[in-house]
Amino acid sequence: MIRPLVVVRYVGLILLILVGFMLVAGGVSCIGGPDQSTIPLFFSALIGLIIGIFPVIFSKGVPSITRREGYAIVVIAWLMACIVGGLPYLLYGDDFNIINSFFESVSGFTTTGASIINDIEALPDGLLFWRMSTSWIGGIGVVMFALLILPSMRGVGNTLSDMELSTIAKDNYNTTKRSSIIRLLIITYCVLTTIATVSLRFAGMDWFDAICHAMSACSTCGFSTKNASIAAFHSPVIESIIIVAMTCAGIHFGVFLSAITGRGSVRGFSSSLKVYISFMIIVAILASLSLWYHNVYSTLLGCMRRGFFHVVSLTTTTGFAITDTNTWPAFCVVLLTICSLICACSGSTTGGIKIDRMVILAKSVQRRILRQRNPNRFYNVRIDGKSISDDRVEDALNFIAVYILIVAVGCVLFTAFGNDLQTSFSGAVACMGNVGPGFGIVGSVNNYSSLNAATKFVGVLLMLLGRLEIFEILQLFYNHRKE
């Protein structure tokens, strides 16, 4: 049985962390004098504080929680974060009706980067910073921030972090101390964001744009302060820095700790990392050559500049843009769609199926072929010299199958609500993979504003399913065993 008071207490604590970030955004809105987002941000923070503080006051903490309670806390915390996080948009008004506010909030927290805003540059700084804050919080996870900051949650930290970390990500850590994993993730995340911020500032951005784009790149969200995204800066140097930041954010964060400390704190990432880097290079070269062959851009260097940027952007599920990919040849569109499906490594801030699962799939297919050749011999699935359990192989294959099925259902629903096939398929892929831009109406220089409310709601469901990696939500409804 789920204890409702226990669930609402910890959801309330998590909302208090969200309120803290909202107050920071409110402070940004007051720099140089209050702007139009000041009242919406502070009033939304007050509402969030009231919602979060009452469960904390009137319910007691517990030394432990059940796994089903953990699933309930994580899922409800994400939903409440998206609802409360949408209040500043709704109170600000303009294009933000209820569905648009919720869509923009979910897009930020899930680091999808799909937007309904037609004129981003017209938004006040406070609301822009809040928009970036939702993506930065979502990149590492709202529950993760709460586990690190709030001492009262440490007693249930192991269970909740198990819910937040995907199986394929946490299995790569040697340590069983979840507190160490959380600390590692947060420190790495902050360091990457700081380095990206300073680099972008020296490359020519002002401090506000540098901070916002660093937060967006390291969370692999793709929100920008400019209508034209990264293309607005007309700078190959800035584009190169963004490429490096996106690539790093797509790597298992434990790799960075191993590089810094010299200790093997992560195992089983070598194959995935090699495939991840090789995949992006090969696809980027193919896309660049296709652009050059079809004379989309005048020079090979120009084709490579755009090809590499967009391949990295979509593989890391960031979604930044420097050109309109709707004008690209069909071959490039297919390549970018594959990038949006497979995506980067586990243990990063990216969405999608993940390279790690594709490596396991390839090894599983190889084992199947070998067994057909020699039925009497036993073959293990081995990665980096270590055997992978059949349970882990089954988990990966089940995830891929359910993921593709949900994308297919999403595509059907998109078309059912009146969208063309290209927009429907690419939109479903982009929302489920937390990528953001697709093709057609939702292309790289367009947004989701013209879609009807029903389509946006389907997009919201896909974004949440993709960010919570499907089974965290399904477990809440299908785990009927006695606790």
Image: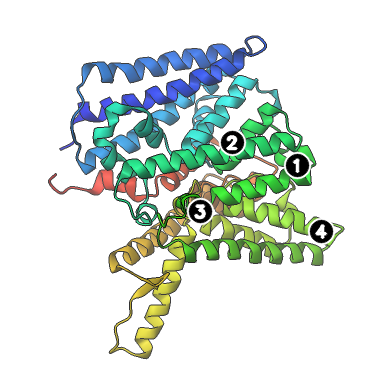
Q: State the residue in front, 34 or 334.
A: 34
Which residue is tagged 1?
231
Side of 95 where 6 appears, left or right: left
Q: Distance between the residues labelled 2 and 1?
A: 22 Å
Task: Check the image and name the residue furthest to the front.
Answer: 262
The picture places residue 480, in percent across and down from the top left corner, at 18, 47
Q: Quadrant of the N terminus?
A: top left
Q: Residue 259 carries which label?
A: 3
Q: Pick the residue in front: 173 or 140.
A: 173
Rate crowding at label 3 as few (under 14), some (14 to 19) or many (20 or more) other CA atoms within 10 Å.
Answer: few
Near mark 2 (Cα within 10 A), the count class, few <14, some 14-19 or many ≥20, is: some
Residue type beneath disc 2: Thr
Instruction: Tell me how far mark 1 sits from mark 4, CA to CA.
Output: 16 Å
Q: Mark 4 points at which residue?
A: 301
Q: Which mark, by number, is residue 194? A: 2
Badge 4 or badge 2: first in the primary sequence: 2
Cα separation, mark 3 vs mark 2, equals 18 Å
Q: Can residue 434 be seen in this view?
A: yes
- Outermost residue on the top side: it is 33
